[in-house]
């Protein structure tokens, strides 16, 4: 580790840095703020005599850039990307009550389909996270969002189950990259005192994506008039629903590619001081519109990683081995003191909440369908073999109540999201995770116990409202517990752990929901409760500085 001072200069590679009294030409700017910033930087640099005494740390620079319009726009853009991931993941659960007949899916096939999405997310999570730490957040976000949207849309044309499964798997690889990277990217623009609330606000857009997916399903899938023939393919309404669900991801990729900047924290760590200064200037300009305040940042301090190791790689095998070690090195660093205990606890938390939430949530539409005639979720199971294929009369005519109940359950996220935003910077993420997981486990237990359709819906809404608090708090804590050079890799790794748990959860539900319905539901309750107890061992991170 070597310390260096990053002096303010602009991104033009042909322009000399601001060193001493060197002659430089001010960059062209359409705003007074740009000219003021340039003059301020030049005069400040000359007065410092070249020793960088007034250079700012990242946290100081973020504070000086202000808080306002820029962060509002950033929240909407990143939130839309987060919502697009939610739409792409959850759309499968909403199309299953109808698509299971057209694709001839048994309960085991449904479990395999939902598991394939999370398998792709597991692979994509770590690979994209590693690339984001090496190549930058923005580039990875554009590529992963594009993969998500394009292959998600292509799945609508799949005539068979196995091709549909393959395309959803590739789409999952894209989703697996954008989820961890978007939170790393967003957190690295936030001032310390507002970071918890802002990340909670970003997590709230998952609810928006959930509601959007449920609303689209309710509006599109029951509409038989949207069905048409596309060559030899009977393009049913659920296929149109799949296409519409890919639009948020594709639009997010365009927005990031055309309008968004790289993370200033990443730029500082990468030694790209000119680009970092430009990002802070843009933040300052947006946040201080209409103000005569001068741009206060004349230089930046950073800690950069220096690797002086020279490696001679004379064969393809050596190069491959070295690259593999580079890719896996962040994992080993996560389990070295003082990161060991927090990594183990986060491993447990991601596994418990992902198995419980995705294992149950992805099956909600199917479970709601089973209680349309009254009774509890498990009492209406006729106990057929999970390999029995469905008949068309079990899917048509389409019952809109299934999608209405899914929409209500999705909307039940709202109270939990509001509480997360209000309490995150007051009580901290540790307490919120622990309490919400404990209550979530209890609510799932009652989902199994209740005996009527209305009671099942009510307890599902309670689970929805409470469990989202734990997700929001986990998003905040996991971004604050690791340094910049490990942040995206760590989030990618832990989301990968979560995807393994989600795969297991969906396969367990697929195998047992028809024969031993109580087992997977009670297992979810136990895991969520256990996660709540494990969360009490997390370190406190309320309003700490990013490292």
Image (cartoon, rainbow, N blue to C red):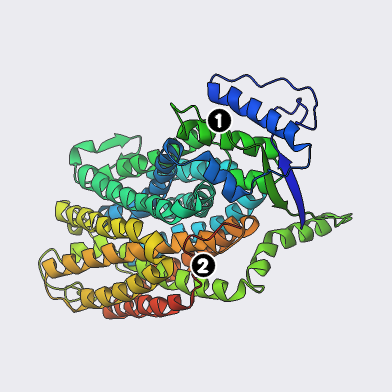
Q: Secondary structure at mark 1?
A: loop
Q: Position of residue 426 (x, y in %)?
A: 38, 62
CA neighbours of label 2 inside 10 A, class few (<14), some (14 to 19), many (20+): many
Taking 144 as reference, is 523 above or below it? below
Numbered tag placed on residue 366 in the rendering? none
How far across and how far down the image is residue 101, in percent?
Answer: 27, 55
Residue, disc 2:
497
Q: Is residue 108 visible?
A: no
Which element carries disc 2, helix, strand or loop?
A: helix
* Location of residue 233 in the rendering, given as x and y in whole percent from the top left corner: 34, 40
* Tag 1 near tag 2, CB within 8 Å: no
Q: Is residue 515 left or right of residue 356?
A: left
Q: Nearer the viewer, residue 432 or 140?
A: 432
How packed mark 1 is, by other alpha carbons closer than 10 Å (few <14, some 14-19, many 20 or more), is some
Q: Quadrant of residue 518?
A: bottom left
Q: Nearer the viewer, mark 1 or mark 2?
A: 1
Comparing 234 with 324, the one in front is: 324
**Is 57 placed above or below 530 here?**
above
* Residue in the picture at 17% in, 69% down: 456
Rendering coords of residue 494 (x, y %):
53, 65
Measure the alpha-carbon separation of dots 1 and 2. Answer: 47 Å
Of callouts 1 and 2, which one flags the residue occurring earlier in the amino acid sequence? 1
Q: Which mark is residue 294?
A: 1
Q: Is residue 428 above or below residue 221?
A: below
Taking the spot 35% from the left edge, 34% from the top edge, the residue there is 231
**Quadrant location of the N terminus in the rendered image:** bottom right
Instruction: Indicate left or right for 469 with 323 as reference.
Output: left
Is residue 89 in view from this perspective?
yes
Residue 39 falls in which quadrant of the image? Answer: top right
Residue at left offset 57%, top offset 50%: 59
């Amino acid at each position: 580790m070597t310390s260096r001072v990053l002096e303010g200069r602009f991104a033009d590679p042909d322009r000399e840095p601001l060193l001493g009294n060197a002659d430089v030409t001010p960059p062209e700017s359409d705003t007074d703020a740009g000219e003021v910033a340039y003059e301020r930087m030049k005069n400040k640099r000359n007065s410092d005599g070249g020793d960088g005494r007034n250079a700012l740390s990242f946290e100081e620079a973020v504070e000086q850039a202000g808080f306002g319009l820029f962060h509002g726009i950033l929240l909407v853009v990143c939130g839309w990307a987060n919502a697009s991931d939610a739409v792409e993941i959850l759309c499968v659960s909403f199309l299953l009550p109808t698509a299971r007949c057209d694709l001839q899916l048994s309960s085991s096939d449904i479990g395999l389909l939902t598991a394939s999405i999370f398998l792709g997310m597991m692979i994509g999570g770590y690979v994209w996270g590693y690339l984001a730490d090496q190549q930058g957040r923005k580039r990875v976000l554009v590529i992963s969002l594009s993969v998500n949207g394009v292959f998600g849309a292509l799945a609508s044309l799949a005539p068979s189950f196995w091709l549909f499964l393959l395309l959803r798997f590739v789409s999952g690889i894209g989703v697996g990259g954008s989820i961890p990277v978007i939170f790393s990217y967003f957190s690295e623009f936030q001032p310390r005192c507002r970071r918890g609330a802002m990340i909670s606000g970003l997590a709230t857009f998952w609810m928006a994506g959930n509601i959007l997916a449920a609303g689209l399903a309710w509006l599109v899938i029951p509409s038989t008039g949207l069905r048409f023939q596309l060559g030899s393919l009977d393009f049913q309404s659920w296929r149109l629903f799949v296409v519409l669900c890919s639009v948020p991801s594709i639009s997010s990729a365009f927005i990031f590619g055309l309008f968004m900047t790289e993370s200033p924290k990443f730029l500082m760590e990468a030694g790209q001081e000119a680009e970092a200064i430009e990002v802070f200037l843009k933040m300052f300009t947006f946040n201080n519109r209409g103000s005569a305040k001068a741009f206060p940042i004349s230089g930046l301090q950073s800690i950069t990683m220096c690797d002086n190791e020279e490696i001679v790689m004379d064969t393809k095998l050596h190069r491959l081995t070295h690259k593999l070690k580079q890719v896996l090195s962040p994992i080993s660093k996560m389990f070295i003191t003082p990161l060991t205990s927090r990594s183990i606890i986060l491993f447990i938390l991601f596994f418990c909440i992902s198995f419980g939430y995705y294992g149950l949530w992805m099956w909600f539409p199917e479970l709601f369908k089973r209680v349309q005639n009254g009774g509890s979720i498990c009492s209406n199971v006729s106990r057929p073999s999970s390999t029995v294929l469905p008949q068309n009369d079990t899917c048509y005519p389409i019952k809109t109540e299934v999608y209405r109940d899914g929409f209500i359950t999705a909307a039940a996220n709202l109270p939990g999201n509001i509480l997360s935003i209000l309490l995150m910077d007051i009580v901290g993420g540790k307490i919120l995770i622990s309490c919400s997981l404990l209550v979530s486990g209890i609510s799932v237990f009652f989902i199994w116990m209740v005996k009527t359709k209305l009671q099942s819906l009510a307890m599902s809404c309670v689970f929805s409202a409470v469990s989202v608090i734990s997700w929001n708090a986990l998003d905040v804590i996991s971004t604050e517990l690791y340094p910049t050079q490990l942040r995206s890799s760590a989030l990618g790794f832990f989301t990968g752990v979560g995807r393994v748990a989600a795969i297991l959860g969906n396969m367990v539900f697929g195998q047992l929901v028809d024969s031993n319905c109580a087992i997977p539901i009670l297992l979810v309750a136990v895991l969520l409760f256990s996660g709540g107890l494990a969360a009490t061992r997390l370190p406190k991170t309320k309003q700490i500085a990013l490292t």
